[in-house]
Amino acid sequence: MTTASRRTFAIISHPDAGKTTLTEKLLLEGGAIHLAGEVKARGANRRARSDWMKIEQQRGISVTSSVMTFERADRDGNVIMFNLLDTPGHEDFSEDTYRTLTAVDSAVMVIDAAKGIEPQTRKLFEVCRLRNVPIITFVNKVDREGRDPFALLDEVADALALDVCPMNWPVGMGGQFEGIFDFATGTLRQPSGPSKEYEGKSATFSGLDDPKLADAISAEGLARLREEGELAQAGYEPFDLAAYRHGDLTPVFFGSALKLFGVTELIDAISAHAPPPREQPAEPAPISPDRSDVTGFIFKVQANMDPQHRDRIAFMRLCSGKFRRGMKLTPSGTGKPIAVHSPILFFAQDRELADEAFPGDIIGIPNHGTLRVGDTLSEKADVRITGLPNFAPEILRRVALRDPTKTKQLRKALDDLSEEGVIQVFYPEIGSQSIIGVVGQLQLDVLISRLEAEYKVEAVLEASPFDTARWLTGSEAALRNFADYNRGNLAKDRDGNPVYMAKSAWDVGYQQDKNPDLTFSATKER
Ligand code: G4P
């Protein structure tokens, strides 16, 4: 199988919209049936944070994996390999989530039909938009009472400034739900049996005006389907592959992950329309997936997947070339080639040694800390993949030790954890106490528990005098001049880049106005 048959994607959603359920059903469709229970269990645990933390600790922090690979034939019988990357779905946001989205070629956005676009959906969507990641929308839970489908479509269009194209239509929702009609194929799938799931009850019609539809659904249902279906097809953009791939249009599928409606259509759409591995932004020039030598980048580092070992797994997204086990790659961080002897492929919960891998694939590389988030790995050591952002932290804290003799351990721990991307560390120009920054509260909880569990360091977090941080760029003279007046607000990040520590967002704006020759940036590309 080659690059063209790869689909590397993520599901973005607000908690509870049904991401876990949909993941499970996609895996079922892909034949990875034995996994379904596992995914569900994880979803249930996730809801209670304390449970989640416990599990994370028992398993050595990161059940919030990772990658699920499965295969499935498309409509023409070609085998497609899907790499579904899990974006952690906690209420809190972490940089992991953002970075994972840099490793996908497309996304599925799940929306709860009763709730529409929720805050987390919007945030994740914005990250996708930054990189023109094409999105297929799945409006979930139509088996329950939900909002009017037109209102939902308009909300997606307005809130996200996207053209929407309904691909199918629900015949009623909730108590009135009689099935889903697929516009392209004329197939009507209907609930059957006591569970009201879709269990194979489907028929294909010549179109909305096919008289035989009257035998399948109630008179009211049919009247509604015809009226709404025609309006839906006439009132929105037709499907346009180029517009979708450019991130300007989203095809919308109505469905129910729980009852299996719309799931087959969704996965068929991913096979048919979602882009295969795309060109990757890089210096000195973008990397085409057709390039023959191996390149890839680390978007995530996970510690202690196996509690017996202190290994870390670095997740590499392959961007070009055919990877073979044992080959030597040079990480941009150290510049010293490493031989990748035990690359792991993630067939969901199973892990296998990867003998080979292709662009779009994700492999896990066990290492002892040599690989960092943001590293490029390449055969020729002549490129640096860009576009993997660091985000300005939304929460800043000082770390205070309960036992002051543990300063060295603390420093080591903060170094390690920032290398993994769990936290960011800033070193103020004045004073010795480093400041840690995170994007979401959960990262702080993880930090404290890992300090204790892995480094035997008991620490508490204290308020920091700063509220947010911005990376500073500008000419050397401008930076020096700025530093002369603002030393108390300056810090360095772990790569030595200058950072302005601000007391408020207002402060950032004020300084930017006063110093037009400097750029105060909320993201830093590595
Ligand atoms: P998440 O990963 O996005 O957080 O959501 P998850 O799949 O865990 O789903 C959240 C809740 O919504 C679950 O119910 C799930 O069963 C339900 N759900 C998901 N898809 C559908 C659907 O298509 N129709 C209906 N009616 N419900 C759906 P729960 O009660 O919180 O969990 P559980 O007790 O069912 O496990």
Image (tube, helix red, strand yellow):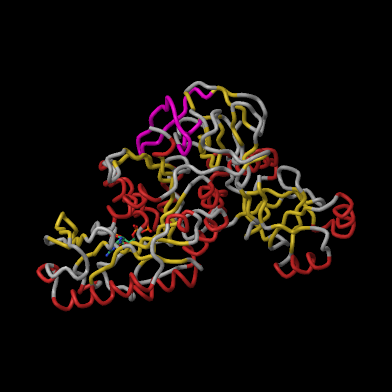
Whether residue 95 can be seen here: yes
| Ligand 1 occupies quarter | bottom left
Residue 374 within the magenta-colored segment of the rendering:
no
User: Would you say 501 lies left or right of 399 here?
Assistant: right
Which residue is nearer to you in this view: 477 or 456? Answer: 477
Res. 504 image quadrant: bottom right
Q: Is residue 300 above or below residue 221?
A: above
Please tell me which residue is depicted at 37% across the width and 56% down the height of the picture: 19
Residue appearing at x 74%, y 62% in the figure: 502
Where does residue 479 sit, x and y in percent of width and height?
85, 53
Quadrant of the rendering where the C terminus is positioned:
top right
In the image, the segment drawn in magenta is 340-365
Tell me: residue 439, above or below residue 169. Answer: above
Q: Is residue 264 left or right of residue 512?
A: left
**Could you tell me which residue is drawn at 54 percent across and 58 percent down?**
129
Look at the image and tell me whether residue 316 can be seen: no
The answer to which of 440 and 353 lies nearer the viewer is 353
Q: Is residue 471 above or below residue 229?
A: above
**Which residue is located at x 54 percent, y 52 percent?**
98
Q: Position of residue 18 (x, y in %)?
A: 35, 59
Q: Nearer the viewer, residue 218 or 399?
A: 218
Placement of the N terminus among the 4 image quadrants:
top left
Q: Report x, y in % for residue 47.
A: 39, 58
Q: Is residue 509 left or right of residue 19?
A: right
> How many tags in the picture?
0
* The quarter of the displayed image where residue 21 is located: bottom left
Residue 466 locus on image (x, y percent)? 72, 61
Q: Is residue 344 magenta?
A: yes
